[in-house]
Amino acid sequence: MERLRQLNTGVIEVICGPMFSGKTEELIRRLRRAKIAKQRIVVFKPQIDTRFDEVQIVSHSAQKIASIPVEDTPAMKHCLDQLDAPADLVGIDEAQFFDHSLVEFVEGLANSGIRVIMSGLDQDSKGQPFGPMPHLLAIADIVTKQYAVCVLCGAAATKTYRLPEQTDAQVFVGASESYEARCRYCHQQDTSCL
Ligand code: ADP
Ligand code: MG
Ligand code: ZN
């Protein structure tokens, strides 16, 4: 990663994995380091995700960083166009909730020299690729796939299990009251650990 930075080009970094795998923590860690390096950073999150806070990104371990809630990619572009000086780094949490236009948008940012770091769910609770994530993973320069701890057996969890009483829609924003991290085996079992 540092080597790519030294080439002075933009870069697309994607942090993916199931819920509770530390995607937001890792995004916040990279953003904090960039702040120490005096980079100008702008952080977006989808307006739909107000689970913990309206304007901050908050991890399940209560780490936080200021962010701008936006509805879509034109809203991100609008924010970036308003800046006095261009951003060095654009962070985007919960990238799976944006539509496919995010792909072209972040490619444009990276091609113009901006470091883009996105975190998002690679799979929905049915194990299917989520929103623009497959395409983002394909075009990314750096991909980090993280694992949580399976709440049933303690193995590495690559999947997000939606507790049975929840809706069937792909987008349903919730946290530990609605979802569990599970390994591939336990994700196929219809039992709750509660
Ligand atoms: P993500 O953004 O991937 O949903 P967060 O960065 O918000 O994850 O939170 C990660 C934190 O969640 C962990 O550091 C840990 O404190 C907590 N956590 C709660 N349940 C689990 C679990 N089953 N596996 C791993 N971490 C968990
Ligand atoms: Mg998160
Ligand atoms: Zn398991």
Image (spheres, rainbow, N blue to C red):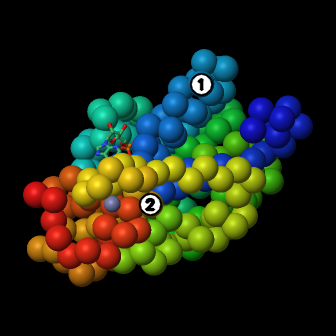
Q: Which mark is residue 158?
A: 2
In the rendered image, the vertical position of residue 152 relative to residue 100, given as above or below: above
- Pointers 1 and 2 in contact (C-beta within 8 Å): no
Q: How many marks?
A: 2
Q: Nearer the viewer, mark 1 or mark 2?
A: 2
In the rendered image, the vertical position of residue 22 relative to residue 77, given as above or below: above
From this viewpoint, which residue is outermost toward the right? 7
Residue on which disc 1 sits: 33
Residue count near mark 1 (Cα–Cα under 10 Å), binned few <14, some 14–19, many ≥20: few
Position of 26 with respect to 9 (left or right) is: left
Q: At 62% from the left edge and 27% from the top edge, which residue is drawn?
A: 34
Q: At 73% from the left edge and 44% from the top edge, which residue is drawn?
A: 114
Q: At 24% from the left edge and 44% from the top edge, which residue is drawn?
A: 52
Instruction: Identify the mark nearer the N-term, 1 or 2.
Output: 1
Residue count near mark 2 (Cα–Cα under 10 Å), binned few <14, some 14–19, many ≥20: many
Q: At 77% from the left edge and 32% from the top edge, which residue is drawn?
A: 2
Position of 69 with respect to 178 (left or right) is: right
Q: Secondary structure at mark 2?
A: loop
Q: Amino acid at mark 1?
A: Arg
Q: Amino acid at mark 2?
A: Thr
Viewer-nearest residue: 163 or 190:
190
Position of 182 with respect to 71 (left or right) is: left
**Separation (CA) of disc 1 from disc 2:** 27 Å
For the C terminus, give its image quadrant: bottom left
For the N terminus, give its image quadrant: top right
Position of 30 with respect to 140 (left or right) is: left
Q: Position of residue 95 (x, y in %)?
A: 49, 59
Q: Position of residue 174 (x, y in %)?
A: 23, 58
Q: Position of residue 155 (x, y in %)?
A: 38, 53
